[in-house]
Image: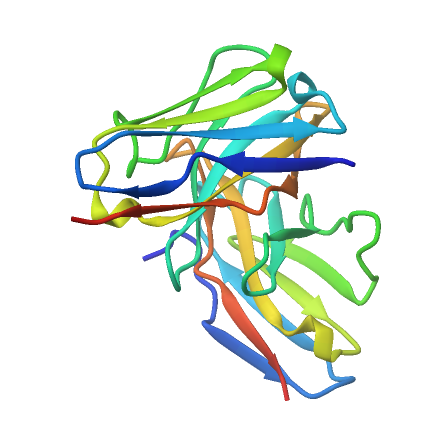
């Protein structure tokens, strides 16, 4: 069982807005930044959002992140077929002295 | 080209040892914190350990503490993971990843290798 909790699946139709939640606790999300990674099956993960809400160069502004209290969320607007992938949240856990990942959310574009 | 390339994976029996390598090209390894992350078949990402660009503090996930050791050779632009006392549950794709530290804060794992496969089975 992952320290960070994500829904196992999410879905939407092209053009829709989808959000993926990530729930943690006082030792991780509440006290430190959240990061989001996108992984197309069979490929390496890709950094999507860093320090809660910043997008690396090349990531479309359709992707946005936010954090409040012990939870964070990733929003994808204008959903496209190429967004179909697994999405993981991550944060540093001060109690474990370890990086922790969510269990991942499989996004399906219908 | 900026990239990370892992090698050293393979098939081995429980209790065995293996050393993974990760060679960086296109950037200077010593300027980054480096990590090992694995993904078991059909499972999510699991962080294992990291090596700071400078300094000696290293942290390990409980699942590998005492069995795995991370090291680096900045002169060879290479990162390593020594894995001992391997178990069936260590079967996974092992990725190395880099993290840039800016103003004391990590900026995320912004570059990943494609991974090397480790299979532990009798």
* Residue drawn where x is 39% and y is 60% of the image: B43
- The residue sitting at 25% across, 49% down in the picture is B89
Q: What residue do we see at 83% from left, 53% from top? A: A58
Quadrant housing the N terminus of chain B? top right
Above-or-below relation of B58 to A10: above
Q: Is residue A86 above or below residue B88?
A: below
Taking A66 as reference, is A88 left or right? left
Tell me where residue B97 appears, x and y as whole percent. Answer: 58, 37
Q: Is A40 positioned to the left or the right of B3 in the image?
A: left
* B14 relative position to B33: left or right: left
Q: Position of residue A23 (x, y in %)?
A: 48, 59
Number of numbered labels in the structure image: 0
Residue A43: image location, x then y, percent:
59, 57
Residue closest to the eye, B53 or B93:
B93
State whether residue A109 is above or below residue B93. Answer: below
Left or right for B93, reference B4 = left
Locate residue A36, reporting x and y percent. Answer: 62, 54
- Which residue shows up at 70% across the image and 29% down it? B25
In the depicted view, which residue is nearer to us: A33 or A47? Answer: A47
Q: Quadrant of residue B76?
A: top right
Query: Colour mode?
Result: rainbow
Figure check: B51 above or below A41: above
């Amino acid at each position: 069982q992952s320290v960070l909790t994500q829904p196992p699946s999410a879905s939407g139709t092209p053009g829709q807005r989808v959000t993926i939640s990530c729930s943690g606790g006082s030792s991780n999300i509440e006290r430190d930044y959240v990061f989001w990674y996108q992984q197309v099956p069979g490929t390496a993960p890709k950094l999507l959002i860093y320090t809660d809400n910043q997008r690396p160069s090349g990531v479309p502004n359709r992707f946005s992140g936010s954090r409040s209290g012990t939870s964070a969320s990733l929003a994808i607007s204008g959903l496209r077929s190429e967004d179909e992938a697994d999405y993981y949240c991550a944060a540093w856990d001060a109690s474990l002295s370890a990086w922790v990942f969510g269990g991942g959310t499989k996004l399906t574009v219908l | 080209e900026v990239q990370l390339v892992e090698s050293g994976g393979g098939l081995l029996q429980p209790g065995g040892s293996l050393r993974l390598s990760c060679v960086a090209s296109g950037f200077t390894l010593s300027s980054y914190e480096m990590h090992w992350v694995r993904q078991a078949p059909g499972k999510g990402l699991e962080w294992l350990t990291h090596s700071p660009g400078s300094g000696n503090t290293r942290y390990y996930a409980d699942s590998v503490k005492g069995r795995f050791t991370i090291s680096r050779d900045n002169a060879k632009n290479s990162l390593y993971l020594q894995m001992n006392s391997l178990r069936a549950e260590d079967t996974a794709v092992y990725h190395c990843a880099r993290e840039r530290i800016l103003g004391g804060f990590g900026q995320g794992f912004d570059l990943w290798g494609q991974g090397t496969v480790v299979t532990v089975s009798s």
